[in-house]
Amino acid sequence: MGRVYNFSAGPAILPESVLKKAAAEIMDYQGTGMSVMEMSHRSKPYEAINDAAEALLRELMGIPDNYQVIFMQGGASSQFAMVPLNLFHKSNKADYVNTGEWSKKAIAEAKKYGAVRVVASSEDKMFSYIPRLNKSMFDQEADYAYIVTNNTIFGTLYPELPDVGKLPLVADMSSNFLSQVYDVSKFALIFAGAQKNVGPAGVTVVIIRNDMLGHAKDITPTMFNYKIQADAKSLYNTPPCYTIYIAKLVFEWLKEMGGIPVIEKINREKAAILYNFLDNSTLFKGTVNPQDRSLMNVPFVLPSEELNENFIKEATQNGFVQLKGHRSVGGMRASIYNAMPIEGVKKLVEFMKKFEMANK
Ligand SMILES: *Cc1c(COP(=O)(O)O)cnc(C)c1O
């Protein structure tokens, strides 16, 4: 069997050229006689990979000099605790926007360490939209404001960043990291688990403004202290070396194609193909408020559970895999991350058209 069209929400599809490069280098990485998996994280070749990964990411995102880049373990979920443990330091208050499962989990975790206020929520309509926000809704005394830029499960995306006044803005960008241009200087902290748009599971990228460092609570575990991790240049302990190496290959792939503005344009084209079809279909239906639609995760439904099941089954038989929606939403979800080629989306839509004709 050849490669399938993989619409998994994560761990997700990787660029084929990256997989090929990794395969070519697996027995002998650049004349070292070993794979990156087998080398000391204190060795020269590995340090070069670590440095190059950071430099490439800085270049791709235009990360200002007063920000640190940290490659961490523990997944995006560890950040749910790390953020409050490091950022609560003055009022011990934080403002969260609740836009889905991932913000709910972050809220629950932050509540262990301080006073969390949910400033707005879209739970009333199954998280199918992004609440409209304005500055007056945010408590200017809070230590930070927290959003999830792209909601992986429900398929929503902030059409624009909220105005939070002078509050440090923290963003969980796990599922749309590097998919569109963001001005990093608008954020105090960005984090993203790798397995959606960056590489294999195992590394979480943290981009943090210098003034956010050094306020960790006394109880903060050493490994959870951003300052300790930043000072050690992500090498406080053994990092997930191989994952960081793959991330570096993905960054190179993005740079070669022209960077984030180019991939954003492609991502918008891909999403438009799918949404246009959904908007004009008499059978399939998108589940998200059109203004707030994700470019990365596209949930949709058919009129009955039976049709949903048949569609997923037939799609799988035809090489379109991992299209089942999250258990909390049902139906289908096509995740079309950076590495999904435009042909994959076109072919999926062709298949959906055929399914529609056959099931009218
Ligand atoms: C996948 C995901 C997470 C959880 O990531 P883990 O690495 O599994 O902890 C958190 N937030 C968002 C937005 C995600 O998409």
Image (spheres, grey):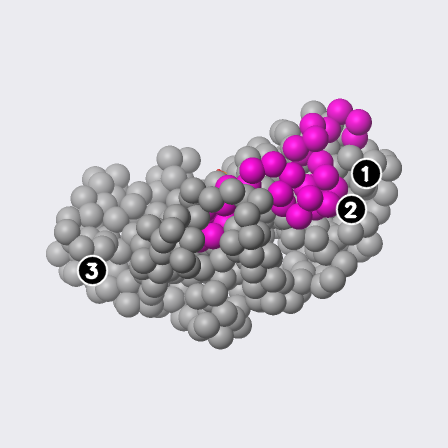
- Labels 1 & 2 near each other (Cβ < 8 A): yes
Please name the residue shown 18% across and 44% down the image. Answer: 313
Please name the residue shown 71% across and 36% down the image. Answer: 225
Quadrant of the image containing the C terminus: bottom left
The residue where tag 1 is placed is 215
**Label 1 crowd (10 A; few <14 / some 14-19 / many >=20):** some
Q: Which residues are magenta?
A: 217-246
Name the residue nearer the viewer: 215 or 171.
215
Please name the residue shown 28% across and 63% down the image. Answer: 344
Please name the residue shown 84% across and 47% down the image. Answer: 140
Foreground mark, 3 or 1, reads 1
Q: In the image, is residue 171 above or below residue 104? A: below
Mark sitting earlier along the chain (2/3) = 2
Whole-angstrom CA distance, mark 3 to mark 1, is: 53 Å
Residue 82 placement: quadrant: top right
Q: Is mark 3 within 8 Å of ligand 1?
A: no
The residue where tag 2 is placed is 212
User: Can I make out residue 33 in this image?
Assistant: yes
Which amino acid does the dot numbered 1 rest on? His
Which amino acid does the dot numbered 3 rest on? Phe
Foreground mark, 2 or 3, reads 2
**Label 2 crowd (10 A; few <14 / some 14-19 / many >=20):** some
Classify mark 3: helix, strand or loop. Answer: helix
156 with respect to 106 (left or right):
left
The numbered disc on residue 351 is: 3
**Label 3 crowd (10 A; few <14 / some 14-19 / many >=20):** some
Q: Is mark 2 within 8 Å of ligand 1?
A: no
Q: In the image, is residue 18 above or below residue 73? A: below
Q: Position of residue 248 (x, y in %)?
A: 49, 57
Residue 74 placement: quadrant: top right
Name the residue nearer the viewer: 173 or 134.
173
